[in-house]
Image (cartoon, helix red, strand yellow):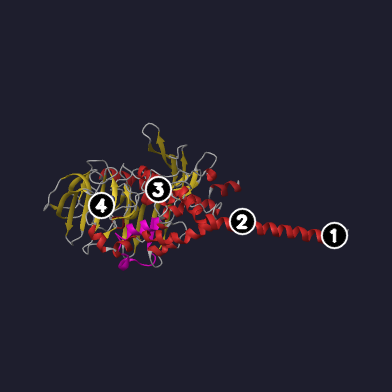
Amino acid sequence: MDSRRQNKLSSIFLLIVALLLAAIILFAKIHSESAGDESESAAETAKAGPSDTKKPAAAEVAQPAQKPEKAAVTAPAKPEKTEEPAAEEGVAEAAPESIKASKNEDDIEESQDVPNTKEEVIVKDDSNADSEGYLHGKILPKKGIEEALLKVPGLQLKHAMEISNAIRYDVDLTQIKAGEDFKVKFDKDGNIEEFVYYPDIVTFHILKRDPVENKLKYTSKTLPTERRFRIIEGSIESSLNESLVRRDDVTRNIRAVTVGILECIVSFSTDARRGDRYRILVEDKYYQNRQVPGSKVLYASYEGRQAGFHEAFRYEDEEPKSAFNAHYTVTGKALIPSAMRLPLDTIRITSPFGMRRHPITGKMTQHHGVDYGAPVGTPVYAVAPGKVIEVKQTPLGGKQVTINHADNTKTYYLHLNGYNVSVGTAVSARQRIASVGNTGRSTGPHLHFGIKNPQGNWLNPLKIKMIATPQLDNKRMPRFKKQMAEITALLKDTEKYQEWLRKYDEGPQPGDFYDLYDKI
Ligand SMILES: [Zn+2]
């Protein structure tokens, strides 16, 4: 072959390629200089709506898949803005003025940049949708459900608020965990048609648009699970906590619950000895041989040389969210070291303490308490003994009661329907003071409950262990005794089963049936 000719041809070819590349680069450069900024902001506007462009939410809606350079620019900006809210206590302590100013008012804020929903440009991006038209997302670490929703292409703040407001009365949003899945489907008009949150393989929380009322309606589906029981037992080297940390069959939750229960009956600091024994009965849930979340500690016991023998049983009311569902000693004594009692009989958290998107304005605001959803008229109780210092009505907090307690801790009860007390009334713990209402600025019947320490700082009520009662009453004791008997029977059965498993693993032993069979 003529190699010189070939060389010449290939160098001509390379030259043409180089020229073409140069032309492309030049064209791209001219184009980006003339229209660069506009096209970028236009792209953002299209995705997030014109009024949202200032907000971090808008940056989050940008799709990294389509514009990697842009995502790289917006990504570092995010943590600064959104990590701030995560440090709830820090924010509360750093801003005493604003806290004082918002003293009794629930959810106070002066909002100027409420999203303008009228001029939104709806751009749906179906490129990531699955074959059924769902867009998929995951719950983010330390973020509310709204922030995770805003990551879905085309999903705007108004959609996120509609979803979180429709679901918060049925799903405890304080329990959502990073990595859990959800999916969302838009209808042809760009509204949410369906939203499904499925934190595990058996639980489905579904919001579907009701065509008549044009509202998202909640339903749930739980696949049937099988309960399995196991006994965890062992002896202590240095501490119960350390013994449990070393085991791979004990989750952090089981450990925290067990240690929490037993430290109320055993004074570990003085009475624990090496060789003391513990025993825990755990109920696990399985679906098609796969474990799903929701393990429970049904029983825990401690037997120590110095400490003696102590045991605790789990009690459950018929109502799954009953404030009385907890662990008790054989005599019905509660095992939570706290003087505070829960303000309601049923605990459904609809909004936690700290930074959150306000359910009405959609703005990020500091929430100085916790919201418990409950029907209008539900009794509200004082969480500790004290004296009523305020009974009043305000535009935001509605009808409200404030109680001052012995150490000058104050508790606040907002959005009430009616009062059972007046200023100056001395109240005892669990005394009825009012009923749940929907007064003031509120999206639905709920109790806003706040605690302020003697220094005047708002505390997170969810970080304070509260119980319904220190002692189960006569009404509940028969049910508790029945449950104790069931748990005791389960303990025996599980023990037998585990013994059988151990033997099975060891193979035929001298003297057992199979050994005799071999000899015949
Ligand atoms: Zn509230």
Q: Is residue 340 visible?
A: yes
Q: In this rendering, would 87 be left or right of 418?
A: right
Kind of residue indicated by mark 3: Leu
Q: Which of marks 2 and 4 is in front?
A: 2
Residue wearing tag 3: 157
Tell me where residue 70 appears, x and y as whole percent. 51, 57
Residue that numbered label 1 is attached to = 5
Q: Name the residue under label 2.
A: 27
Q: Alpha-carbon neighbours of circle 1 within 10 Å: few (<14), some, or many (≥20)? A: few
Q: Using residue 128 as the reference point, say whether residue 11 is left or right of it.
A: right
- Of tags 2 and 1, the one toward the viewer is 2
Magenta residues, start to end: 253-279
**SS of the residue at dot 3?**
helix
As for residue 126 lying within the magenta part, the answer is: no
Label 4: which residue?
Answer: 106
Cα–Cα span, label 2 and label 1: 33 Å
Q: In this view, does 397 lie above or below 305?
A: above
Mark 2 and mark 4: Cα distance apart in space: 57 Å
Q: Say which amino acid is labelled 4.
A: Asp
**Callouts 4 and 3 close, C-beta under 8 Å:** no
